[in-house]
Image: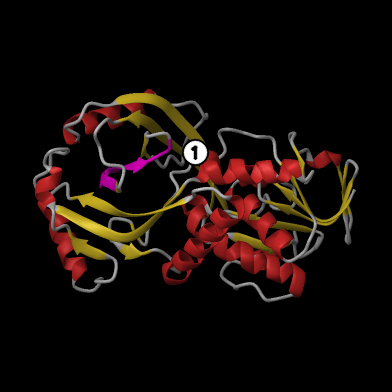
C-alpha cells in the first residue's frame, strides 16, 4: 500500500493530525496498539483559559480556545457524535490568602475571572469558608468518544494498523519510509512518551510526567461545572466524575499509588458533603517538553521523519491548532510557528 503519511499513535495528537491531513486530500495510515493507559485515553478533556496558582492566561489561549471549539464542533457534525460541552470552573478558595489572591487578580483579568454570585447554592454540596471564584468560559472535550469514533472511521476505511509499532521493522530513507507492506512519503510520530525512546527524537528535552486520577460516582452532584480545590472534580462519561490529577516527575513505576488515593479521599471527605464511590484508579505518562511548548515538525537531518508530540496536559487545547498548522506545512510548505518548530533543537538532533 502506498500512502502519503504514516502516523504513529492515535491519541489526541495522532487523531487530529491524521484528520487535518485527510482534509487536505492526503492518504494516511495510522498505527496504534490500543494502549488504554496512554495519556490521551485518561485525559480529563478540560480546556482552561487560566492556569496555575498565579492565575495567568494559558499560553496562546485567545487563539487556541476558539480554534479548538470550532474544530471539535466540526468533528461533531462530521461524525454525528457529541464531544464538546461549555462549562465553567468553580474555584473554591482554600484560605483567606487564596481568596485575596483571586480578588487581586480580578483587577487585571476581567475576561475570564469573576466571583461566583451563587455561593449559597453550593453549601448543599461542599464545605467551604472563603468564597468561590469562577473561571469562564471553559470547554470540556469527551476524549474517549473522539478517539473511539476516529478509530472506527479508520477501520471502516482500511486506514489503520492495530499492533505495537516497532521502529526496527521500518526501512527509513531520505525520501520515504517502508513499514511492512506500507510505503509512505513521511512518517510522523504522535505516540506520546514512546517518542522519548525513539532514536530520532530521544535527544529532545523530554520530561516524563506520571499522572493519576480517580473515577467516582457522586450521585446528586451537578455535572454542569468543574469543581476545584487542590484537586479537580470534572464531569466524565456515563454519569461519572474524573478526580485528579497528580504530577509526579520522580516515579519509578506506572502502578497506581495508595498514597494518591488516600490523600484524594481525605480531601473529598473534608470538602464534599455528598456520598461518593470510587470505581476506578487511572494512571498515565504524559510527554512533556521542558520548555512547555509542543514538538512539531520534520527532523532536520532525516526529513522523511517528523514529530507531533509533547503536548503535556494541554493536548485538547493545543493539538487542534497545531495539527492544522503542521498539516498545511507538510502539504503546502506553510511555515511553522518558531516556538513549536522542532528545528529549534536542530543542533541537538543533528548529533
Q: Quadrant of residue 326?
A: bottom right
On the question of residue 9 being in view, the answer is no
Range drawn in magenta: 226-237
Residue 235 is one of the magenta-drawn residues: yes
Using residue 318 as the reference point, say whether residue 300 is left or right of it: right
Figure label count: 1
SS assignment for the magenta stretch, majority = strand
Q: Who's the residue at 20% across and 68% down the image?
A: 106
Q: Quadrant of residue 262?
A: top left
The relative height of residue 189 versus residue 49 in the rendered view (above or below) is above
Q: Quadrant of the C terminus?
A: bottom right
Residue at disc 1, secondary structure: helix
Q: Who's the residue at 60% across and 73% down the image?
A: 338
Using residue 165 as the reference point, say whether residue 228 is left or right of it: left
- Residue underneath mark 1: 42
Q: Who's the residue at 80% across and 63% down the image?
A: 303
Q: Nearer the viewer, residue 202 or 4?
A: 4
The relative height of residue 292 versus residue 146 in the rendered view (above or below) is below
The picture places residue 84, in percent across and down from the top left corner, at 45, 53
Using residue 296 as the reference point, say whether residue 91 is left or right of it: left
The picture places residue 142, in percent across and down from the top left corner, at 48, 46
Amino acid at each position: 500500500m502506498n500512502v502519503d503519511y504514516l502516523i504513529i499513535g492515535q491519541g489526541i495528537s495522532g487523531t487530529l493530525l491524521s484528520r487535518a491531513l485527510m482534509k487536505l486530500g492526503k492518504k494516511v495510515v495510522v498505527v496504534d496498539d490500543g494502549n488504554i493507559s496512554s495519556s490521551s485515553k485518561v485525559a480529563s478533556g478540560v480546556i482552561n483559559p487560566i492556569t496555575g496558582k498565579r492565575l495567568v492566561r494559558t499560553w496562546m489561549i485567545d487563539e487556541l480556545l476558539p480554534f479548538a471549539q470550532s474544530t471539535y464542533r466540526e468533528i461533531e457534525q462530521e461524525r454525528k457524535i457529541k464531544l464538546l460541552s461549555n462549562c465553567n470552573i468553580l474555584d473554591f478558595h482554600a484560605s483567606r490568602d487564596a481568596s485575596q489572591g483571586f480578588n487581586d487578580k480580578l483587577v487585571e483579568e476581567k475576561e475570564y475571572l469573576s466571583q461566583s454570585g451563587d455561593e449559597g447554592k453550593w453549601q448543599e454540596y461542599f464545605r467551604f469558608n472563603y468564597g468561590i471564584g469562577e473561571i469562564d468560559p471553559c470547554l470540556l472535550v469527551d476524549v474517549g468518544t473522539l478517539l473511539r469514533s476516529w478509530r472506527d472511521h479508520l477501520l471502516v476505511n482500511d486506514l489503520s494498523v492495530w499492533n505495537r509499532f516497532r521502529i526496527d521493522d521500518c526501512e527509513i530513507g531520505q525520501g520515504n519510509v517502508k513499514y511492512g507492506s506500507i510505503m509512505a512519503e513521511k512518517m510522523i510520530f504522535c505516540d506520546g512518551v514512546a517518542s522519548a525512546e525513539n532514536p530520532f527524537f530521544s535527544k529532545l528535552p523530554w520530561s516524563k510526567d506520571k499522572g493519576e486520577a480517580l473515577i467516582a460516582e457522586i450521585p446528586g452532584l451537578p455535572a454542569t461545572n468543574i469543581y476545584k480545590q487542590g484537586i479537580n472534580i470534572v464531569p466524565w462519561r456515563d454519569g461519572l466524575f474524573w478526580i485528579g490529577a497528580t504530577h509526579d516527575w520522580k516515579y519509578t513505576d506506572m502502578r497506581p499509588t495508595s498514597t494518591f488515593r488516600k490523600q484524594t479521599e481525605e480531601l473529598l471527605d473534608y470538602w464534599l458533603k455528598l456520598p461518593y464511590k470510587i470505581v476506578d484508579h487511572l494512571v498515565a505518562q504524559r510527554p512533556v517538553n521542558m520548555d512547555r511548548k509542543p514538538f512539531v515538525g520534520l527532523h532536520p537531518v532525516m526529513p522523511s521523519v517528523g514529530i507531533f508530540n509533547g503536548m503535556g496536559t494541554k493536548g485538547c487545547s493545543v493539538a487542534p491548532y497545531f495539527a492544522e498548522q503542521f498539516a498545511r506545512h507538510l502539504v503546502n510548505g506553510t511555515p511553522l510557528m518558531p516556538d513549536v518548530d522542532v528545528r529549534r533543537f536542530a543542533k541537538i538532533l543533528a548529533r
